[in-house]
Image: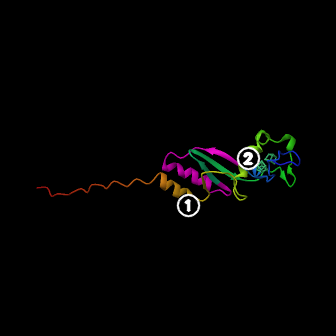
Amino acid sequence: MTKKNKEPAVCKKCAKCCSYFCLEVDAPDERDDFEDLAWMLAHKNVSFHIDGEDWQLMVKNECRYLGKDGCGIYETRPRICREHDPSECDYGSVSDTEYYDADIVIAELSELYAYRDEHFPLKPRKKKKKKVLKKKK
Ligand code: SF4
Ligand code: SF4
């Protein structure tokens, strides 16, 4: 959300806020829910960011209107862009390679399955009782 001479001093003009979007997804309640989460995560440039009970699907995909001088539609940019407050921008606290300050970031299927197995472990199967066959007298 950069535009020359329009940002408050706090904005680093890094344009990270124009390079991704996040959507809230339902946090998993049971082991089976990870099937759908795995499908989402199988797509390129997608990760999950977890803060407590809050699960966000993060899609790293640059805005089509971001140019080398910043926003190409600054005067008519969407509301989310207009309301974005650089003074609350996360990027002051994270490194250049990170996008969003979350407790847990899951970017690989192996990480997702490890999370699933830790929080929703498989229940041990009940042993079937063996039938004891007896000869009829
Ligand atoms: S419309 Fe402009 S401000 Fe909004 S994300 Fe795209 S480049 Fe950034
Ligand atoms: S991510 Fe933050 S610091 Fe970077 S351009 Fe956007 S508002 Fe400014």
For image coordinates 62% across by 52% down, the residue present is 48
Is 45 inside the magenta-drawn segment? yes
Q: Which mark is residue 110?
A: 1
Out of 122 and 81, give the one closest to the viewer. Answer: 81
Which SS class for mark 2?
loop
Q: Which quadrant does the C terminus fall into?
A: bottom left
Q: Is mark 2 within 8 Å of ligand 2?
A: yes
Task: Decide if residue 54 is on the left or right side of residue 75.
Answer: left
Which SS class for mark 1?
helix
Task: Decide if residue 76 is on the left or right side of residue 110.
Answer: right
Q: Which residues are magenta?
A: 21-46
To which residue does mark 2 refer? 89
For image coordinates 80% across by 40% down, the residue present is 82
Sequence-wise first label, 2 or 1? 2
Q: Amino acid at mark 2?
A: Cys
Q: Is mark 1 within 8 Å of ligand 2?
A: no
Q: Neighbour class for label 1 at 10 Å: few (<14), some, many (≥20)?
A: few
